[in-house]
Amino acid sequence: MTNSIDAVMPVNGKILETLWNPVEIFKRPRQVKYAVLITNRPISLSEDVVMPIWKEAMIKIAIDGGADVWLEYIGPLAEEIFKGNYPELVPTLITGDFDSILPETLNKFKSLEVQIIETQDQNYTDLSKALIQLAVHCKTRNISLDVVYVFVGNGGRFDHIMATINTLYKSKTLMGDNHVEKIILVSGNSLSWLLRAGKHRIKIPEILHEKNSWAGLIPMGCTANASTTGLKWNPSTPLNFGGMVSTSNTYDGSPEVTVNTDSDIIWTMGIEPLLEMTNIC
């Protein structure tokens, strides 16, 4: 039985397709190795969802002011971790140019001997630099990750949103030999990720059909000739800005959506019905 987190399935040295299962962020197979990154945006997901994801992560990175976001999120447990309790809630790394983290927060984490990496290069965003440091951390410790979850909050500045999308496109260059194919942006109501040029299969839980949950395929930078199955409206023309962009789409009842694209393209999907499931974790 193939583990659905496997990013690629090579045949005769060629990548055949990438298989995605969005439910795995909530029901994580034991063999899946992943990292969690917290950005400087409030986390709106419930603790029942976030805490298990955080605790089971191999690597936990707070990006600059994301360290304060994390402390605010865990509430009264924040003081406890600085007393030596709940070590599983302590980040592995804190990175960034430190223009947004509170100085007292930084000093408190230094007292716990958390690895602090200051990254001042203003040619890169803090998220881009965090991915670089994640790759270095994995290389020096011989860690191979299956997926990276980036908590990006809801809304916020449009330029920040676009910079985050740009980081997805640059991630292979940023991370080099330790690149992780699956980098998934997690907000309060959606999952979004980059589909590299090639073939993809995305598993769609039945509840997303029942609730007519939304999905979208968004080309960034260049035209994408993408053929799909499993969507209510499968695009029949090339996707590009100034032309066709597949937003506010939904599913046709098939268990999977397939995408075959000649250019990198963003996939985004609503997850509200998944979050409403009582036994999600």
Image: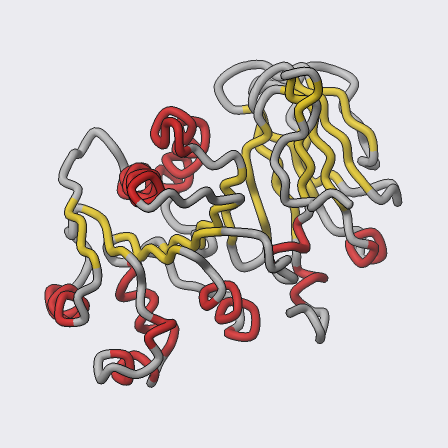
* Left or right of 187, for residue 258: right
Residue under the point 44% across and 54% down: 151
Report the residue that reaches farthest toward the right: 253
Near-viewer residue (143 or 34): 143
Residue under the point 52% across and 34% down: 181
Residue 154: x and y in percent read: 47, 55
Near-viewer residue (99 or 35): 35
Residue 233: x and y in percent read: 81, 31
**Numbered label tally:** 0
Which quadrant holds the C terminus? Answer: bottom right
Does 126 appear above or below 207? above
Does 129 appear above or below 84? above
Residue under the point 41% across and 45% down: 143
Which quadrant holds the N terminus? Answer: top right
Determine which quarter of the picture holds residue 278.
Answer: bottom right
Near-viewer residue (264 or 33): 33
Determine which quarter of the picture holds residue 198.
Answer: top right
Near-viewer residue (61 or 225): 61
Residue 84: x and y in percent read: 25, 81
* Left or right of 68, for residue 212: right
Q: How is the image coloured?
A: secondary structure
* Left or right of 176, for residue 235: right
Residue 68: x and y in percent read: 27, 66
Residue under the point 59% across and 51% down: 190
Does 191 appear above or below 54? above
Does 191 appear above or below 91? above
